[in-house]
Image (tube, rainbow, N blue to C red):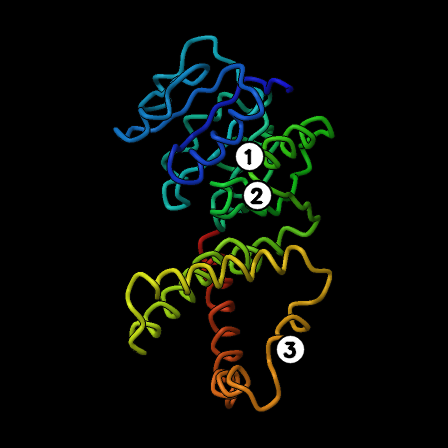
Amino acid sequence: MSILPALLLVGGGRMGSAMLAGWRERGLSQVVVVDPSAEAQKLAGVGVQVVADAAGIPAGFTPEAVILAVKPQMAAAALPAYARFAGQALFISIMAGKTLRTVGQMLGVRAPVVRAMPNTPAAVRQGITVAVAGHQVSPRQKMLADSLLCAIGSTEWVEDEDLLDPVTAISGGGPAYVFLLVELLEREALAQGIPAALARQLARQTVIGSAALLAASDEDASALRLAVTSPGGTTEQALVVLRADGAWPDTFSAAIQAATQRSRELSA
């Protein structure tokens, strides 16, 4: 097991704590977490120190990477305090919508920045992250970023930063759409008279099992869908309703476009 270098994690919320858990499994040397919440204190442990703000970072601490896991709305207020690490540390931003240029302006032109968009299955090391490296990032720093991001799932790299906006809409928000589907399945099971415990189990396990089947299959999702859809059967009738006048496809398209546009707005 390789030992990761010294890291500074700014933000110990859901995604920050998921990343920290993945790094613990890889082996830590020293991590300082900056988060003022009482909940963040639970992250402290062997190799991990939690401080309330940037002023609490131990003197002489020199991280090889600074991971920016704060809400994008907090970026302007939070990031300048870490500009002192520009030129010596890699910055990895997981803030939705904040571009490489925007983050660089807050940290200084010397700051090498990777912009990444992970998603919440990172909490069980099943996330998918898409990342783009700024021009200041060295090959060695990109390898470090890849190692840190792969600790929470799979990682894909792109050259075109503009892709991060639709990626945010598709995979960043994607788990919420899946969870909504589970909610709706459970709700309709209850409406059809299925007992609550069984309704919950049916909704959850249907999605869990379908995801496992998708992961184990080389077939496209459309082929798997057709395999479930017998001509003239019950599933076909349900799909007729869901696709009538483009109902579900059109609504889903509009939803992804709205999320993509919001990601672009957050860059301002």
Q: First in sequence, mark 1 or 2: give its number.
A: 1
Q: Which residue is mark 2?
A: 116
Give the amino acid type for the residue marked by disc 3 in the picture.
Leu
Viewer-closest of 132 and 26: 26
Q: Amino acid at mark 1?
A: Ile
Q: Secondary structure at mark 1?
A: strand
Which quarter of the figure is the N terminus placed in? top right
The answer to whether the residues at label 1 and label 2 have Cβ atoms under 8 Å apart is yes
Judging depth in this view, the residue of 205 and 87 nearest the camera is 205
User: Which label was assigned to residue 226?
Assistant: 3
Report the residue at 59% width, 36% height from top: 149
Q: Quadrant of residue 78?
A: top left
In this rendering, the answer to whether 7 lies above or below 217 is: above
Number of residue marks: 3
Give how far apart the Cα atoms at labels 3 and 1 are: 41 Å
Measured from the top left, where is residue 211 in percent x and y?
A: 56, 58
Q: Residues within 10 Å of mark 3 (few under 14, many from 20)?
A: few
Q: CA distance from mark 3 to mark 2?
A: 35 Å
Kindly identify the amino acid type of the residue bearing the numbered disc 2: Ala
Q: Which mark is residue 39?
A: none
**Residue drawn at (50%, 48%), measured in percent from left and top?**
119
- For marks 3 and 2, the one nearer the N-term is 2
Residue that appears at 51% across and 42% down: 122
Mark 2 is surrounded, within 10 Å at the Cα level, by few (under 14), some (14 to 19) or many (20 or more) other residues, namely many
174 shown above or below 249: above
